[in-house]
Amino acid sequence: MSRISTSSGPGELLVELRRDTGVPLHQQLESGIRTRIRAGLLRADTVMPSTRALAQDLGLSRGVVVEAYQQLVAEGYLVSRGGGYTQVADIAVVEPSAVKPSPSGPPRIDFRYSRPDVSQFPRAAWLRSIRQVLNETPYRSLAYLDGRGTIELRTALADYLNRVRGTAARPENMLICNGFAQGSRLLLQVLAAQGYRRLAVEDPSDNDLRDVAAAAGLEAVGVPVLQSGIDVDALERSGADVVLVTAAHQFPTGAVASAETRAALVAWAARGDRLVFEDDYDAEYRYDREPIGAMQGLAPDRVAYAGTASKTLAPGLRLGWLILPARLVEPMSQAKLMDDRGSPVFDQLAFADFVARGEFDRHLRRMRPRYRLLRDTLVHRLAARLPEFEPVGVSAGLHVMALLPPDLAEEPLQAAALERGLGVYGLAPYWVSAPGPAGLVFGYGSLTPKEVVEGIDLLADVIGTLRDV
Ligand SMILES: Cc1ncc(COP(=O)(O)O)c(C=O)c1O
């Protein structure tokens, strides 16, 4: 089989020809071009390669190509233009069976969680950092990377995290990854390979990681979250050897792990070869007081720490980082190299420059009052319009969880709200061991204060209508 991509002439053309089938070559050429036009892969007005160039690239006589083009012109797939060139004709193409658009479209006001206000992305400062690194990075830095990521970013982040989150990070123990998603997946794979068997997750908690754990061969078990953080006695009874906690701001309840819980978690990890995996996903956003320091600083050998730029800058950056106990650094570095050979180098270097110049701090200082205003607006409007809702959790982050009054169930409420163009989201997916109380998680990061007010007013209307029927 010859499978040749020709780039001669104004257009590029990939054609598959088999010389062992007995099917004449001009027919194969015709059918290859026809199929691609019908599928919309060769679009109307695309200029075809000249017959001479195509014949040369495919190792055919020019007559074979001329014959194929003539046939396709006769069939209306190609048009022969003056000046001796040929173009794809404008015919109705068969659209591939693709993703069907959703019938209702996105909600007009959407309280979906996990969306920071990306419209505030600090473009000018980021551009300065990109320019800087493009100008100054030596060529040798563009070679394959250390599995842990660039030393520049590991150093900048270690300094930042030690200063702001109270961690005990050293650049040697840090690993740059594509967000928490990749960091957590690799860590669970490495732990499973080292003989870890059971992962405890907070109940309720984000559900993504449970599937990741199962794929890695770890059993996930839910452990209840109290107002003071995860229930460490229940953790002890669970038989887990690794636990994932969102200690600074529990997702979704918004609880903060107390000093006692943190100490008990560290003590739990120290009994046996256990590990605490700390997901510090939005700790930079604490509005009523300074955030509590990360657990990693208490026990660097017992805690693996994960951070992400997804809440602070933008999820599309796919920049995340881990601080690892020494024994996990090498296997994780290998796992990262096996997975993707490292995160893109200019992104890492630009972020390093951005952090080292103090732009990250500046951005957070600018965003904190905005998010705080959104949260306050949401909580006050709930109190005014839906006083029977019960917001829980501390003043922090980009979401508020509220428990529903007993006469309301999540699903009908979500469906009725969606009919009115309002996106609200229940707690059901987050419960691990058994269904818990009904509630909603309001993400407000990407809304304006006006939209928050409108959204809660609309929700109050929807509930009024549901109660009337
Ligand atoms: C609990 C939690 N951790 C971490 C993340 C960040 O994930 P990533 O860094 O892969 O974007 C999220 C994002 O929504 C989250 O909800």
Image (cartoon, grey):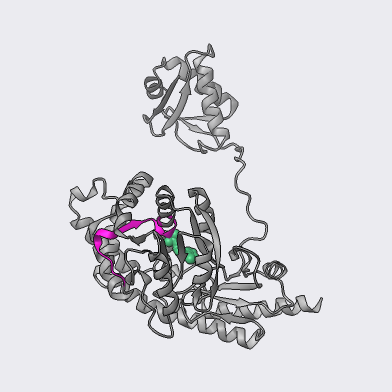
The quadrant of the image that shows the N terminus is top left
Establish if 43 lies above or below 380: above
Residue 105 spot, x, y in % from top left: 63, 60
- Foreground residue, 453 or 26? 453
- Foreground residue, 369 or 295? 295
Residue 403 spot, x, y in % from top left: 63, 77
- For image coordinates 43% across by 27% down, the residue present is 84
Task: Name the outermost residue toward the front.
Answer: 271
Seen in the image, is 234 located left or right of residue 332?
Answer: right
Seen in the image, is 261 located left or right of residue 442?
Answer: left
Tell me if I can see residue 375 in this picture.
Answer: yes
Task: Name the outermost residue toward the bottom.
Answer: 384
Q: Is residue 92 magenta?
A: no
Establish if 98 lies above or below 406: above
- For image coordinates 36% across by 46% down, the residue present is 340
Q: Quadrant of residue 297?
A: bottom left
Tell me if I can see residue 455 in this picture.
Answer: no
Q: Is residue 178 magenta?
A: yes
Give the number of callouts.
Answer: 0
- Foreground residue, 65 or 342? 342
Q: Quadrant of residue 416?
A: bottom right
Residue 28 spot, x, y in % from top left: 52, 20
Residue 439 spot, x, y in % from top left: 63, 73
Q: Which segment is the magenta one?
A: 167-183
Task: Name the outermost residue toward the top.
Answer: 22
The quadrant of the image that shows the C terminus is bottom right
- Foreground residue, 379 or 131? 379
- For image coordinates 51% across by 66% down, the residue present is 235
